[in-house]
Image: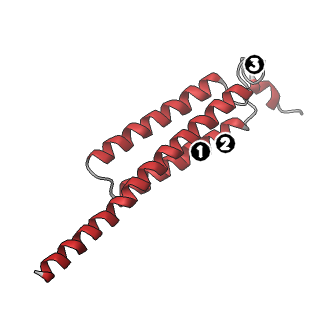
Amino acid sequence: MKKILLSITAVSALAAATAIPAVASAQSFDHRLDRLERRIDRGLRSGSLSRGEAYRLHAQLRETAHLEHRYRRGGLTGWERADLDRRFDRISAQIRFERYDRDYGSGYGHGHGHDRDYRDDYRPRW
């Protein structure tokens, strides 16, 4: 009887220990998603992101959130967790790039001389 009780306790402790990282992982992905959304919104408000850039970045975040939901339904494996981390890292890097690329939308980056023929700049001078 003592052995059975001890083995049940051990199995319960092991099950609880494996469930905690899954919950912590879910919270960390949700936290990362929220942080990235706030960074995009902040960039849009400050003018360092154009509406088009913000729209594309939000679409990538939505796509990654849907993928995370699909992964979670079948149980999140180590590979899937690493895949989500890579995707969130890539989106974070894209936000950083887009915020500092000095493309401020129409009037600043596009439109002024955008239709200019740049071959004129490379004429040979002989």
x, y percent for residue 18: 32, 64
Q: Determine the residue positioned at 45% across, 33% down.
A: 62
Q: Which residue is mark 3?
A: 116
Whole-number angstrom distance, CA of label 2 to CA of label 3: 29 Å
Whether tag 1 and tag 2 are in contact, CB under 8 A, the answer is yes
Residue occupying the point 43% across, 55% down: 24
Residue in view at x 47 percent, y 48 percent: 29
Please tell me whether mark 1 sits on a helix, a strand or a loop.
helix
Note whether 93 is above or below 39 in the view shown: below
Identify the residue at the far right of this view.
Answer: 126
Q: Secondary structure at mark 2?
A: helix
Disc 1 from disc 2: Cα separation = 6 Å
Which of the two discs, 2 and 3, labels the residue nearer the N terminus?
A: 2
Quadrant assignment for the C terminus:
top right
Say which residue label 1 marks. Answer: 92
Q: Which residue is mark 2?
A: 96
Left or right of 65, for residue 115: right
